Image: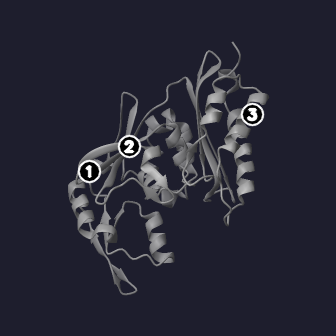
Amino acid sequence: MSGDNHKVDYYFPKDVQEASQWMQQYGDKARLIAGGTDLLLWMERQGYHPKALIDLTRIPELQKLEVADDQVLIGSAVTYSRLLKFPALTNGAPFLARAIRTIGGVQIRNIATLAGNVTNASPAGDSLPPLYCLEAQVGIYGAGGRRSLPIQEFILGVRRTALAPGELVTHLSFQLPGEDWQGVYEKLGLRRAMAIAVANLGLLLKIEAGRIREARLALGAVAPTVIRASQAETYLQEHALDEQTIEATAELATQATHPIDDVRASARYRREAVRGLVRRALRAITPEAIAQE
């Protein structure tokens, strides 16, 4: 393919080994593509011109979507639309499914991938807070073989990941929460649909006998990467979920943020957005699940 006199070699590798070989041959002049929704925007709007595009959509391994012993494996070429038709995900981790439904429109979800959202490494990525709460693992293949990293170790900063030259993401995996867990996803954008998050969050609580036994709270678009609000998590495990606890948790979560001013919002606005989103998320927990013994 070519455009504006910029020739781009386009490859369909048959397996991950061949894809890695093409990546090593072209080095930083090559880009992987599955959905390509962000990559094509960079090429069109920012004048980015790779020498080679390596299309992963014909590699059978990367199309895997399966669950075994409540462990979900999502190949890196699996689209959002497929995920939203996968009962193990929609029933077992509905807060992640809700996050996916906020990404673009149907046309985007038909081609974009969950792994693409992760490797894009935007702190505003809609799927990332739920994946941090689920403590997802990122499967990687390269010249050195296969390895796996927790998502928080894979994403290093804005548009930066731990992928070495020639490596590619093969899959994402995570353990489905049990029936004693409740998850919530909240997002604030500048419009009701198809908007980049001003702030977003994932909340996952383990509730036993009316008490919070474990809490995971991940905040997006308020730091260089998605962050876990560890002090807020610890606090929740020690208190009943009443209005006082909700206000204190919202304050602790706000203190964990490191937002910036940009075209979508000021840092101050983002902090207040986090406060409001945490309140909303905690109040969304099913009242009967958290009722006192």
What's the residue at 49%, 42% (across, down)? 131
The disc label shown at residue 60, or none: 1
Q: Secondary structure at mark 1?
A: helix
Q: Amino acid at mark 2?
A: Leu
What's the residue at 32%, 75% (across, down)? 51
Name the N-terminal-most of marks 3 and 2.
Answer: 2
- Percent of width and height locating residue 221: 61, 53
Q: Nearer the viewer, residue 7 or 59?
A: 7
Image-quadrant location for residue 64: top left
> Which mark's residue is nearer the viewer, 2 or 1?
2
- Percent of width and height locating residue 291: 70, 19
Q: Going by the image, does 262 lie left or right of 121?
A: right
Q: Residue furthest bottom?
A: 5
Q: Residues within 10 Å of mark 2 (few under 14, many from 20)?
A: some
Image-quadrant location for residue 32: bottom left
Q: Amino acid at mark 1?
A: Pro
The quarter in which the C terminus is drawn is top right
Q: Secondary structure at mark 3?
A: helix
Indicate whether 136 appears above or below 19. above
Residue corresponding to mark 2? 149
Residue corresponding to mark 3? 248
Name the N-terminal-most of marks 3 and 1.
Answer: 1
Q: CA distance from mark 3 to mark 1?
A: 48 Å
> Which mark's residue is nearer the viewer, 3 or 1?
3
Q: Residues within 10 Å of mark 3 (few under 14, many from 20)?
A: some
Q: Secondary structure at mark 2?
A: strand
Q: CA distance from mark 2 to mark 1?
A: 22 Å
